Image (spheres, coloured by chain):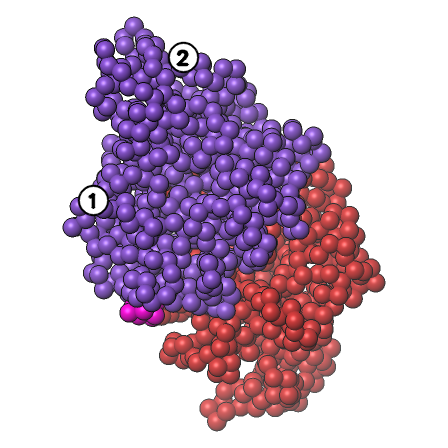
Chain colours: A red, B purple
Amino acid sequence: MKNSKVYRSELTPLTFLRRSAYVYPEKIAVVHKGVRYTYREFEERVNRLTSVLLNYGLKKHDRVAFLSPNTPALLEAHFAVPAVGGILAAINTRLSSGEIEYILNHSGSRLLFVDEELHPLLKTLDLKHLEVIQIKDSGSLADPYEKLLSEGSPEPVEQLLENEEEPISINYTSGTTGRPKGVVYTHRGAYLNSLGSIIETGMNVESVFLWTLPMFHCNGWCFTWAVTAVAGTHVCLRKVDPELIWKLIKNENVTHFNGAPTVYAMVVNSPQANRLENPVTVNVAAAPPSPTLFKNLKKLNFRPIHLYGLTETYGPITVCAWHKEWDDLPIEEQALAQSRQGQGYITADLVRVVDKNDNDVPRDGTTIGEVVMRGNNVMKGYYRQRRATSEAFREGWFHSGDLGVWHSDGYIELRDRKKDIIISGGENISTIEVEQTIVKHPDVLECAVIAIPDEKWGERPKAFVTLKEGRVVSEKELISFCRENLAHFKCPAAVEFCELPKTSTGKVQKYILREKEWGDIEKRIN
Amino acid sequence: MKNSKVYRSELTPLTFLRRSAYVYPEKIAVVHKGVRYTYREFEERVNRLTSVLLNYGLKKHDRVAFLSPNTPALLEAHFAVPAVGGILAAINTRLSSGEIEYILNHSGSRLLFVDEELHPLLKTLDLKHLEVIQIKDSGSLADPYEKLLSEGSPEPVEQLLENEEEPISINYTSGTTGRPKGVVYTHRGAYLNSLGSIIETGMNVESVFLWTLPMFHCNGWCFTWAVTAVAGTHVCLRKVDPELIWKLIKNENVTHFNGAPTVYAMVVNSPQANRLENPVTVNVAAAPPSPTLFKNLKKLNFRPIHLYGLTETYGPITVCAWHKEWDDLPIEEQALAQSRQGQGYITADLVRVVDKNDNDVPRDGTTIGEVVMRGNNVMKGYYRQRRATSEAFREGWFHSGDLGVWHSDGYIELRDRKKDIIISGGENISTIEVEQTIVKHPDVLECAVIAIPDEKWGERPKAFVTLKEGRVVSEKELISFCRENLAHFKCPAAVEFCELPKTSTGKVQKYILREKEWGDIEKRIN
């Protein structure tokens, strides 16, 4: 990793672990079930995994896939895979077997680490091109993952990074085209986004971070690296369980966690909920916190920070930076002010809202345009999809597909989505993908899927279906059909049988369907 | 400043001001005497200065010198000069006319902005190659600087930065060779060091920074940029005046300031000293806080952070990161633990201690070696001194000239200085420069200058002088002679007339002189 320039080191989050293990070797780095690893142990485990990967013959820029909930193994992979010059592909654990297979093939992964609980998903797959390693997540030697580590060398390896713009990870995300696209992150981008999140969310060595957000989402919004940078403590969590969350907040003195409003709604509505002695910072993204949620969070002494971003922006790229004078507003108005997406991180470029010709819309809070971004917190591109990349990067800016307005104070606020994407509990769902699944049913003629507002999940898909002449199929049957072919969270919450409204040229008018479902709600996203 | 890569923006602290003025236009950015500028006004003043510089025909990489105490003008220059692609040379205001002349010539500055109070220093200088602009620091239109701003355009200019490794400033520092050397900072280095200081010292939008540290020292350890990045408030201060400091701490709710132990000793010993309601973070560098100072600071509710660095490392590059378990130690042991220089910033590479062959010394806390650094927080080089640069950068590391030990916990601790440098009240003094001045006296045969410990200033120079056969001159006369030719702080505190101890080859044995003066004090720096 040494550069010939004395005054330059390549930016990489790998240095974060090295430094924290050096400065705070005895500090607790990782807490998981009964296990506690110090920073010395965390680094040693990463070194062992690194040497295991080398023993598998992993070469520079080879891909390594992980299918795992938030476990120490997945956290370790965030340092070990790039340490050998590899690229980490952490796969969404809620996907179906077919979707996982697509990602494994498209990424060309050479190794797949899989948590025991998720192993059944691989049953039907042809994995002969892959080395598959099981993780029992037991921390004991009977665990194949732990056994491998025990055989690895605890010594650090010389780093292979030559240029900070080399890829560090690929995060697959559902786009409009149905098939997930692989979003490529660089070492430089991951490093700078980490520093940005540390500063915007106020983390330091005393921070204790609870892993409510899946690490497979944008590498946990880069908090896998950011928490390590400040030598904070990672508290792992296999799944979002409000009772356990409250227990951990109390027992581990949690200071920060991340998630979609859905997660926080579960937390504040849990029977264990009670006012926190010390404030806990909660970073809310994927959708703005509703006034009710905002109020409930504040009441319990949570300190909500509203962030916004996409997989293409390493997770968060904007923050609704709080203004002190808002403290004096009635709480509803505070919530309203904070429901806006705000502006770019300290480490990011300013975010714009543009019209069809890529010119700025007026900052009037009403003209709708597309949100565009550029700079160090924007992905390098879509893996092996040059055309999709240059389309997204047209005019030198990443086009988010999110529609919003630009307020007079410079803050942006989302209003709708250009792309046919539904965001349900923080997960992206491509409406096209759901539509393509439904029309595979032999009785279906055509269909259109839109988002409908949902109190718990923010949005859920609803399908409008026209059956073939003379055929009969029930809503329940169609949903079951989807569940066999799609991740369950992507399946329609409801099916309505009808004629689809169309333009004269035959294009489905989804806005008419949305009108019907959303009525007089001002925005078309939730 | 736009890069052809959508996923890359060149790192530059210029974006900090742009963002803070955008997100917090109405927030107070600068407080100075009766004046308060919001971030909108701060940016507008910077834009005006930028356009003034362009009107002077300033071209890319042209140097602009400033001779000013901590005023809004000097702070504005930190953004306006680089905005036109220029390089800022902020000159130490304690230098003599001859020293200032050398820096103006060596840097090849085209413009010189000078504070009225310092204008007399220029009287004897030939400045015909320079445009000189006076700053009355009055904030009113009768001030030539203010008049210029009023004629400038408030509109931002397109940035000219093409590569983040371009120079942003030159900071002249006294080295061993007598003549000050110009240390070149890059936009990238200034950006990353700023983020490092924000994280290590815990700054955010609520921070109020008091300018006890001169901005001409390493651009105020890059806090000119760092405080702006978090949209904190800069409270300017023309000179260190304990009574005024206490007043400002109280009236402006100061949260952070920087300085050498000398400054803090004045503050805690001031009659105005009283326990602070809210903790104030004080970043101590140039020498470790003594146990007494540490205790006194804590007693008054200051939170001392010990930093270490040199001009060549953008100011601080290491922090003695606090370990929670130290809280339980007796306060003397806490002070001892914190008197060490610690380890590299999050944004810096790890700092090493090496032997003569540039190999690591053992981490035993006793073997003395030289402290070496590399990476993004190390200067680009010495301006127009290629040989001095490659000598300092030998073996791919910057050789600090500071001698220290490496502790088993990885922290470094300074013990002595390889170079003949005295650090007095945070200012570097080259012993060679003082010696060369003294031997210019017609009655002096030879002399040697060393540091002696001083309670107030840390160290001060003492001269050992051999007179020519039959000549007589008093201590007082020699000191006066020095004061005519050198910055006053560089002049000897004492002169002793004697034979100089020498080796058989005639080299002066300074260590014998030091032994005599420092006696059984363990270290040879203070």
Residue drawn at x 76%, y 41% as measured from the top left: A34
- Percent of width and height locating residue B151: 28, 69
Is B151 one of the magenta-colored residues?
yes
Q: Is residue B384 left or right of residue B176?
A: left
Magenta highlight range:
B150-157
CA gap between label 1 and label 2 equals 40 Å
| Residue B361 in sight from this viewpoint | no
Residue displayed at 62% across by 63% down: A305
The residue furthest bottom is: A504
10 Å crowding of disc 1: few (<14), some (14-19), many (20+): few
- Please identify, in this view, whether the residue under mark 1 or under mark 2 is nearer the observer: 1
In front of the other: A384 or A9: A9
* Between discs 1 and 2, the one toward the N terminus: 1
Q: Secondary structure at mark 2?
A: helix
Residue found at the very far right of the displayed protein: A271
Please state which of residues A486 and B368 is positioned toward the viewer in this rendering: B368
Question: What residue is at 81 percent from the left and 60 percent from the top?
Answer: A274
Q: Is the C terminus of chain A in the top left, top right, bottom left or bottom right quadrant?
A: bottom right
**Which chain hosts label 1?**
B
- Mostly what secondary structure, the magenta segment? loop
Does residue B427 sit above or below A323 in this rendering? Answer: above
Between A446 and A242, the one lying in front of the other is A242
Q: Which mark is residue B125?
A: 1
Q: Specify whether disc 1 shares its chain with disc 2.
A: yes
Task: From the viewer's perspective, tell me whether residue A335 is left or right of residue A178.
Answer: right
Image coordinates of residue A150 in percent, x first then y, are: 63, 32
Query: At which x and y percent is residue A157?
Result: 49, 33
Residue that numbered label 2 is attached to: B512
Q: Can you say which quadrant of the picture contains the N terminus of chain A?
A: top left
Residue A269 position by quadrant:
bottom right
